Every structure is written in structure tokens, then in C-alpha cells.
Image: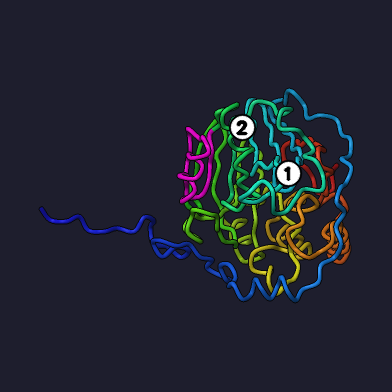
Amino acid sequence: MRARAWRPPFAVSDHCDGRRFFNPQGTTGKSVWDVLRWIVREPSEPWPTHVALPTHPPPPVTIEPGAGAITFVNHCTLLLQWSGLRMLTDPVFSARVSPVPWAGPRRVMAPGLAIDALPPIDVILISHNHYDHVDGASLRLLLARHDPLVVTPIGNGRLLKRLGARRVEERDWWETVTTGGARITLTPAQHWSNRLGVPRNSALWSGFWIDVDDSSVYFAGDSGYGPHFAEIARRLGSPDVSLLPIGAYAPRWFMRDQHMDPAEAVQAHEELGSRLSIATHFGTFRLTNEGWDAPVRALARAKARRGLPAGGFRVLGQGETLSILRAPATGSP
């Protein structure tokens, strides 16, 4: 019997060689020597050990047709609600983001919405496999309690099934999943992937474009700045709301290719043509060298330099909910 020809696990494309993924522009991760140089030579700004959680009203229980609500839980975890549909992005509720529970970056602020206070979750979006986006303990609980559909880039399904996911849809960039009246399109991001037990860059990273009730929300996940933001706008239009990362950017020589700084986030906001952007990926875990409140202060300066209205790119408190009507105007509350 003739042996079956070996085939690579993934389709060859402009971001995959058949076995490993890469960024069409920019590097894909750093070398061990770069990591050592960063740790040994780069100074860090101070972080508090604990920040009191602000008090905000709970998210709405019901959503009227044609409206939506976005609750910033923490880091890149957001609760997205529409009439009859609830999504959670990159859920992280644990005290640390690490392969072990006793070491690694420790949160300085509690989640703005407790995991036990979540409404029933229909869909979980997982952008990539880093520990501050795939929190095993949180996912095991959420998957057992809610049995949601999990949408993720290709290569992540095996990990998520090990954590208890029964329904997983893996897609490549620009491919879509339709569920509960929503159309979810996976979008390019400039990042990388790595996790114990998973070969480096053997799973893809992405953002997500969500069309529902004639409105659109773009969740960028983790990403360095690049031409993909303009390409997303060309292909999919201008989002009503963009969820853009602003933190974990210092030092720039090390982080530039994988994490935007606030000025680049403002540029991405403008290139997307977003009517409203909401900041993510800041103020929860000390991952890099900038200070705890440096991203928020830098975002304010970047908005002022670009003449961006104060309400056009919002910073929400952890646990704060923003009600979104269809096609909100820039600068609206």
C-alpha cells in the first residue's frame, strides 16, 4: 500500500509556512538574548501592589433591540451584550497570569465584574494563547458553567478542548463564524504565540470583527501597530466601536512589534475610522516596564496632539459599562 503523502497541518499563506505562523510585517517574537537584555538592562517604573476597585452600577440585565452594552472587566476581558446575545473576550479572572498559580504577574486590581456575577455567556472569543489571554482556571469554570461556543484562530482548538470546551470554531484571518444573529470575522493582528506544551507560533493570533443588529464592534486582542488596521477598514468598513490595547509597550525596542503604545493606538483608531474606541490591556497586570498609570496618561497626551475629542477614545474603569446605540457619534458618552 502506498504511504499517504505528508501534508502540513495548516494552509500555506502570507502568514503561515504550513507549520508555523508569522507576521507579514514585523518580527514574530524575540530571541532569548533579547529577553535577557530586556530583563537585565531596562529600568522599570513603579507599580502599586494594590489598587482599590472603583464602584460602578452592574451591567444591564436586558438589552433593547438595536442597542448594546460593553463592560470593561479588566485587561482584555470585556462583556459584550446585545439583545439575546452575550460575548466575553479573553476571560481572565485569576490572581496571576502564568503557567503556575504561585508565580508570574499578579493582578493589582480585582476584576471589575466577578466571574460569579456574569450573566449567561453564549460566546467566548479567544485571540491567542498567551497566559494573560487564555487563563486556564477561569476558562475551565466558564466552560463548565455556561457551555459557550468558543471562537478562536486556527491552532488553538486542542488547547481549548483540553480546558473543557465542547464547541470550538477555529478560523483563519478573514474567515467568519455565524452564531446567534452575529457574524464574527477573524482579523489580522501583529503578535506571536507561545505556551507550555504548545510549540512557539504553532497557533495563530487574531482580532475579531463582530456584526450584530446593524452595528459593528472590533476587538483587536493584542497587536503591534501595522498596516492591518487600514486593511481592516478597507475590507470591513469603519466600526461603531473599537476595543484597542494601549499598555505593555515599554521598552519600545522590545515591545514595538507586538504591542502598540497609546500614540499608535490613536493612529489605529483614526485609520479604522472608528466612531468610538475603548482602551484595553492596561492597569491590571504588570507585564512590561512602563508605570501603572502611564498608558492612560500617554493616551490623553496622544489624543490632545491629534485633536481627538475627549469622548472619541474612552478609558473605562474596571467594572464600568458603556451603553452603545447603533452607530454612535464620535465624542458621545
The quarter holding residue 122 reads top right
Which residue sits at x=59%, y=60%? 231
> 123 or 200, which is in the foreground?
200
Examine the structure image and report whether residue 190 is included in the region drawn in magenta: no
Q: Which quadrant holds the C terminus?
A: top right
Q: Is residue 24 visible?
A: yes
> Callout 2: few (<14), some (14-19), or many (20+) C-alpha neighbours within 10 Å?
some
Which residue sits at x=74%, y=63%? 288
Location of residue 282 in the rendering, given as x and y in whole percent from the top left corner? 77, 53
Which mark sits nearer the N-terminus, 2 or 1?
1
Residue 295 to residue 325: above or below? below
Asked if residue 233 lies left or right of residue 54, the reply is left
What is the magenta range? 149-171
Q: Is residue 307 visible?
A: no
Numbered tag placed on residue 95 in the rendering: 1
- Which residue carries the number 2 mark? 141
Residue 299 to residue 311: above or below? below
Location of residue 165 in the rendering, given as x and y in whole percent from the top left corner? 51, 35
Location of residue 266 in the rendering, given as x and y in whole percent from the top left corner? 77, 60
Q: Nearer the viewer, mark 2 or mark 1?
A: 1
In the rendered structure, which amino acid carries the disc numbered 2?
Answer: Leu
- Regarding mark 2 in the picture, which secondary structure is present there? helix
What is the number of callouts on the image?
2
Which residue sits at x=76%, y=67%? 250
Determine contact: label 2, label 1, CB under 8 Å. Answer: no
Location of residue 87 in the rendering, given as x and y in whole percent from the top left corner? 63, 35
Q: Residue furthest left?
A: 1
Examine the structure image and report whether residue 154 is included in the region drawn in magenta: yes
Asked if residue 100 lies left or right of residue 170, the reply is right
> 112 or 109, which is in the foreground?
109
- Regarding mark 1 in the picture, which secondary structure is present there? loop
